[in-house]
Image: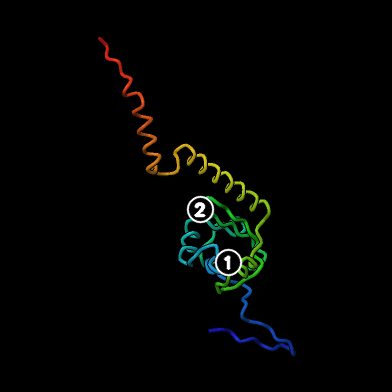
Amino acid sequence: MRRQSATVKGQEIDDSAPDKCRIDKWLWAARFFKTRTIASDAIAKNRVQVGGQRVKASRTVAPGDHVSVEKGPYRFDVTVLGITDQRRGAVEAQALYAELDESRERRQALAARLRADRESRLGLAGEGRPNKKQRRQIIRFQNRNDGDVVPDE
């Protein structure tokens, strides 16, 4: 059910945007996690901190709070700018927080390092199974000295 906007002294005030929200609901609305259950699990596993403190899923966040989210190998350090309890598009979700510059740089450096590691592993191992042409080349390479064997007598 959607809240109606109220009128105070001739001005219309939008009550649909709350001033506080549960942290699990905010993480879901800000699109850090796909479901509230996954957000609650991350909070329970101490992967989310507010102001450097461990929190429970029922903890409320307000604009100005500093939230730290560990998601996979990445860590997001953000400041809450807006509160909503509804999941919206990605552009609107990104307006709910501001990521710190050092956090963004650290995350991009880690992504570059992981990408380089993955490329180096693929370079050593090849690109998966050999195709027909590559298999023939491998067999030819393995059998190239078979005809040159001189018996020891």
Residue furthest out toward the front? 147
Q: Quadrant of residue 140?
A: top left
In front here: 125 or 18? 125
Residue 106 pos. (x, y %): 63, 48
Residue furthest out toward the top? 153
Q: Amino acid at mark 1?
A: Ala
User: At 56% from the left edge and 57% from the top edge, which residue is drawn?
Assistant: 69
Residue 19 placement, left or right of 74: right
Secondary structure category for the residue under label 2: loop
Render colour scheme: rainbow
- Quadrant location, the C terminus: top left
Residue 9 placement, left or right of 84: right
- What residue does disc 1 label? 30
User: At 58% from the left edge and 84% from the top edge, which residue is drawn?
Assistant: 3
The label on residue 75 is none
Whichever of callouts 1 and 2 sits on the residue coming sooner in the sequence is: 1
In front here: 94 or 151? 151
Residue 37 pos. (x, y %): 45, 66
